[in-house]
């Protein structure tokens, strides 16, 4: 258990108006894949309860798990939710209504898995920027095993279809009642594959120099902005590390970061969400010279920035906010272990430690619930 000093109000509990969102505090639920949708990608009532629990627990912002954007190559896992059909939209509307009723704001993360797809009933095979086999092996907690297949290099038509899928999905998200969307350009998935030098060996306008490898992400943001209008909330999640390469860092360090952040702000991003990929924020965010990548993003763009990585630690959370490293904090494992973490932070109640068995043998809601029941039985 983590003990919290319940003296002065924690800075994470202060309300914030940022990126067009009115938030009751600065604590967000990070996107976490739960592979618990119906086989056709329709969210379930169990998922609605899962998201509503975070809102009841006091989180100001709830960001959904990565949601696939088209019925072609975007789906990454079996039982991943989609935002493609009218049925998807209707089921997500139940989620947004319940989250809003509990006082939170909710944003839908839009994801194209690209070469890191390990379960897609719509199309055989995978696609990516180049025919380069992803590093390491598929993730068993999301139903995969063995080496990743070599993707087919995307054609210009494939790229246009992917962009159109993001735009259509963003419109569907707003129809479902979401307060905004977050473009998933992190963690080794399609947009990050284009950004990364060793997975992108293209020689056309989407490969080569950093600004050209970034072009697809910028095109997606620009196209969504054009489709949704100037007031829509469009976040972008970025990371250096990946689900299959935790230690990767942008080769140019701060120079690369400035290019990436500046271009996405110019494309129309409302906020930037910097993911740590399962590592502590201080470890993943610190650049050569001691500055942090999140503070750099704030300085370069003037946009609100969400920091991620161990933000359930009250001392670190306070430091990140008070020292100007970020505007909001997103929590993954800390939120899974403590769906009511903001309430606990407010009252000074102890925090439960994250137990990896919540995600084993697969990261489903059923497995998490079974583990909680077993733990409760052992404690009684």
Image (cartoon, helix red, strand yellow):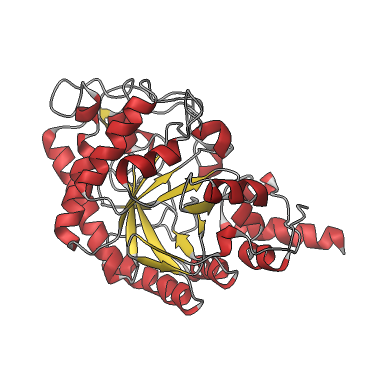
Horizontal arrangement in the rendering, residue 154 relative to residue 65 (left or right):
left
Instruction: Give the percent coordinates (x, y) of residue 342.
Output: 61, 64
Whether residue 138 is visible to the viewer of this picture, yes or no, is: yes
Instruction: Give the percent coordinates (x, y) of residue 296.
Output: 40, 37
The residue lying toward the viewer, choosing from 379 and 281, is 281
Res 41 quadrant in image: bottom left
Horizontal arrangement in the rendering, residue 140 relative to residue 91 (left or right):
right
Count numbered badges in the picture: 0
Q: Residue at x 77, y 58 (%)?
A: 374
For the C terminus, the quadrant is bottom right
Q: Residue at x 37, y 66 (%)?
A: 21
The correct choice, above or below, for 67 with respect to 17 in the image is above
Q: Residue at x 41, y 57 (%)?
A: 39
Instruction: Give the percent coordinates (x, y) of residue 313.
Output: 66, 49
The residue lying toward the viewer, choosing from 122 and 113, is 113
Q: Residue at x 42, y 53 (%)?
A: 80
The residue lying toward the viewer, choosing from 201 and 342, is 342
Horizontal arrangement in the rendering, residue 285 relative to residue 190 (left or right):
right
Instruction: Give the percent coordinates (x, y) of residue 182.
Output: 34, 53
Horizontal arrangement in the rendering, residue 160 relative to residue 334 (left or right):
left
């Amino acid at each position: 258990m983590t003990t919290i000093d319940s003296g002065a109000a924690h800075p994470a509990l202060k309300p914030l108006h940022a990126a067009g969102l009115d938030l009751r505090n600065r604590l967000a639920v990070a996107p976490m894949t739960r592979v618990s949708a119906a086989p056709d990608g329709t969210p379930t009532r169990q998922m609605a309860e899962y998201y509503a629990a975070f809102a009841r627990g006091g989180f100001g912002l709830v960001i959904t798990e990565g949601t696939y954007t088209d019925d072609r190559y975007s789906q990454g896992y079996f039982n991943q939710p989609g935002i493609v059909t009218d049925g998807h939209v209707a089921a997500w509307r139940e989620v947004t209504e319940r989250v809003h009723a509990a006082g939170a704001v909710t944003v839908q993360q839009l994801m194209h898995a690209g070469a890191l797809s390990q379960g897609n009933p719509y199309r055989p095979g995978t696609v990516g920027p180049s025919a380069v086999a992803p590093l390491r092996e598929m993730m068993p907690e999301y139903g995969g095993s063995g080496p990743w297949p070599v993707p087919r290099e995307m054609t210009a038509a494939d790229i246009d279809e992917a962009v159109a899928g993001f735009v259509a999905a963003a419109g569907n998200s707003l129809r479902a009642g979401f307060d905004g969307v977050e473009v998933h350009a992190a963690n080794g998935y399609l947009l990050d594959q284009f950004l990364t030098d060793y997975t992108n060996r293209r020689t056309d306008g989407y490969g080569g120099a950093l600004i050209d490898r970034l072009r697809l992400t910028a095109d997606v943001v620009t196209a969504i902005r054009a489709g949704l209008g100037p007031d829509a909330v469009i976040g972008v999640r970025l990371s250096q590390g990946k689900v299959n390469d935790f230690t990767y860092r942008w080769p140019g360090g701060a120079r690369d970061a400035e290019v990436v952040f500046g271009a996405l702000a110019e494309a129309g991003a409302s906020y930037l969400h910097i993911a740590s990929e399962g590592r502590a924020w201080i470890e993943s965010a610190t650049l050569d010279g001691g500055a942090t990548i999140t503070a750099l993003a704030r300085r370069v763009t003037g946009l609100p920035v969400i920091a991620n990585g161990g933000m359930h630690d009250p001392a670190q959370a306070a430091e990140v906010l008070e020292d100007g490293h970020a505007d909001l904090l997103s929590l993954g494992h800390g939120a899974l272990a403590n769906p009511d973490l903001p309430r606990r932070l407010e009252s000074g109640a102890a925090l439960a430690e994250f137990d990896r068995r919540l995600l084993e043998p697969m990261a489903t809601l059923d497995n998490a619930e079974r583990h909680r029941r077993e733990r409760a039985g052992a404690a009684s």
